[in-house]
Image (cartoon, rainbow, N blue to C red):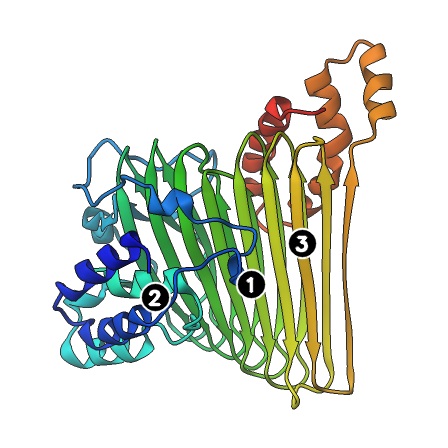
Amino acid sequence: MSEWLESAISRGQKIDDWLTPKRTRALELLSTTQWPTRKTEAWRYTPLRAIQNTKATEVEATSDLTPLAIADLAAIELVFKNGKLDKSLLNADLPAGLTISLGSELAAQQQTQAVADFSEVKPDRHLFGLVNDALAQDVVIVNVEAGVKIEQPLRISALLSQGAESHTRVQVTLGEGAELAVIEDVQAQGETLNTAFVEYFVSPKAHLEHYRFALQTGSNVSVGGCHFNMLDHSTMHSTIVAFGSDLSRLDTDIIHSGQFVDAKLNAIYLLDGNELFDLHATVEHAVPNGTTEENVRCIVGGKAKAVFNGRIHIHRDAQKTLAELNNRNLLVSKTAEINTKPELEIYADDVRCAHGATSAEVDKQALYYLQTRGISRAQANIILNFGFINELIDLMPNKVLAEWVRPIIRQRFSTMKVN
């Protein structure tokens, strides 16, 4: 066990509050968990030196932390500053049918239900999910009543200042037939460490539109997850956009607990320098008649390293399942690295499933041709590569977000090292 994990366990043991029953369980699991090494399959390509060496620690919230502005986006803001929820924003008028509460402030009966729901979607295999269970000092609970469509998206922002460590937790429940869009984003300054986890309970016939923007770079360490439990006839459309940092890891789980669930997951990540980003996506088809479509595209330059593990598990009773996983990768540097592992594990016999992964290099002749026509190398790089991921940006349901992130990605391309 690492010194960092021993310290996390020790800190968790000192917390005594309404989450103690679940925290105790997480601490017991952590105490018997081996620190991942290169021999640990889930962490084979993702060394944890950045966590072991971090000097980030819990610090007080600072008032000067504000979420990055998104032009023309009218959202319901849920803001964490250095791990602490800015409660002043909870006083804002919320749409009818939407409630946002701190678990510690719920009535006894509601709190009992919140404890029962806590960590029920996120699987126990996620090491840093257990760390989050142990160190999250409260939970923000979001509920949308049955049949209610919330027009404005809910934006969950985790903001960290230099040297800060934070562990944030949110539970989102959509009642039957409800509709909600959720935007998750982490914004960090300097050397920081965060675990940001969100669990989603999506009731029958409900629809979830989901985004996770992991655009922190530099010396940030981010290890988080988003986990979805989908019931009968529910639908979801998730988009992940990520850059790399010293260590960025995101685990997602989509669990088909009900029939006729339709789930879509699109992910884009762009890495440069010595950055690392690791996406582990698991889809569990536990019942019949489910549909999953997963598209992951990655562009890597400099000496960066990209990791993708996509697993689709078709259980024995999950007949009539349709599942597709496509991973396309582009290396724009000879020193960049991509490790990809798409997996299909099928135990049912009446299914239609496919998976595939490709890796290619930038077309040097096309790059040279554009440069000979007076186009700068940076601009040529944008022209050649932007179309590779623009298709997934076009598929984002929220066009305001699509137009906001497009120039950010173009700027990222313009600075990527191509060789």
SS state under label 1: helix
Of circles 2 and 1, which is in front?
1
Image point (18%, 61%), residue name:
10
Whichever of labels 2 and 1 marks the residue nearer the N terminus, that label is 1
In this view, 270 is above or below 278: above
Image position of 406 (left or right of 76): right
Q: Which residue matches tag 2?
A: 130
Q: Position of residue 325 (x, y in %)?
A: 71, 62
Check residue 41 in the rendering and tell me which mark sits there, or answer none. Answer: 1
SS state under label 3: strand
The three-letter code of the residue at mark 3 reads Thr
SS state under label 2: helix
For the view shown, which residue lies furthest in the top direction? Answer: 374
User: How dense is the environment of label 2, judged by Cα within 10 Å: few (below 14), some, or many (20 and up)?
Assistant: many
Query: Distance from label 3 to label 1 (Cα)?
Result: 13 Å
The three-letter code of the residue at mark 2 reads Leu
Indicate the quadrant where residue 97 lies: bottom left
